[in-house]
Image (cartoon, rainbow, N blue to C red):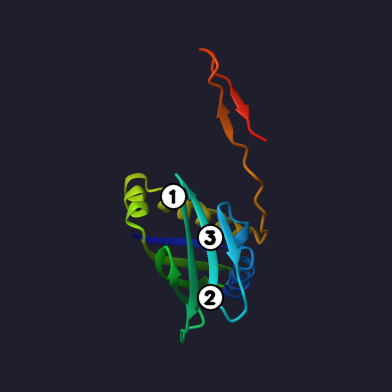
Amino acid sequence: MLIQKIFHVCQSLDETQKRLVEIGHHLGSLDGVKLCAEENQPTHLELAAGNGFHAHVHLEQLPCEDADQILFRSVDGDIEVTGLLELFAIRADLTEVQLTLDYALGESGQGLLDVATTSFDRFVNRQLRTVKAWLATGVVELRAPRERRLRSRMGANRQWQFAH
């Protein structure tokens, strides 16, 4: 599956690059993402995208001659990922960020489920909206646990209850 996102950030190219580095340290704060980063090791991500989808992936950054590009790929895990993040200075105070992400789910059952529900695609897009907001504001908001709604199975007047 191929995802390409383009968005604009109202700040300089240098400031955008600094914020991307800062955000990289907080990826584990995204809902459904657990980050396990060790020095000199590929970054390990554990993902819980919904519909019972759980996966893990090890990502590594690839060498690149252009300082405004970041190439990465998976080296292990349930998902094969290749990606390119490009930054372009449009004006002194405006930067375009382009992300191209190509992924394939490793397990055939998970892949079929995702084709039917597009849950992983929605999960990635939800995370990208959060990262875009973090880039725009410079504020990394830590996730708060979501309340889960449970339906009562008692009688015809079904009431919603919140799980604790």
| Mark number displayed over residue 122 | 1
CB atoms at circles 1 and 2 under 8 Å apart?
no
CB atoms at circles 3 and 1 under 8 Å apart?
no
Q: Quadrant of the C terminus?
A: top right
Q: Which of marks 1 and 2 is nearer the N terminus?
A: 2
Q: Earlier in the sequence, mark 3 or mark 1?
A: 3
Question: Mark 3 or mark 1: which is in front?
Answer: 3
Image position of 76 (left or right of 146): left
Identified by mark 1, the residue type is Arg
| Position in image of residue 90 (x %, y %) | 49, 70
Secondary element at tag 3: strand
> Mark 3 and mark 1: span between their CA atoms?
16 Å
Comparing 109 with 149, the one in front is 109
Circle 2 sits on which residue? 42
Identified by mark 2, the residue type is Pro
> Mark 2 and mark 3: span between their CA atoms?
13 Å
Q: Can residue 128 be seen in this view?
A: yes
Question: Mark 1 or mark 2: which is in front?
Answer: 2
Comparing 46 with 14, the one in front is 46
> Mark 1 and mark 2: span between their CA atoms?
25 Å
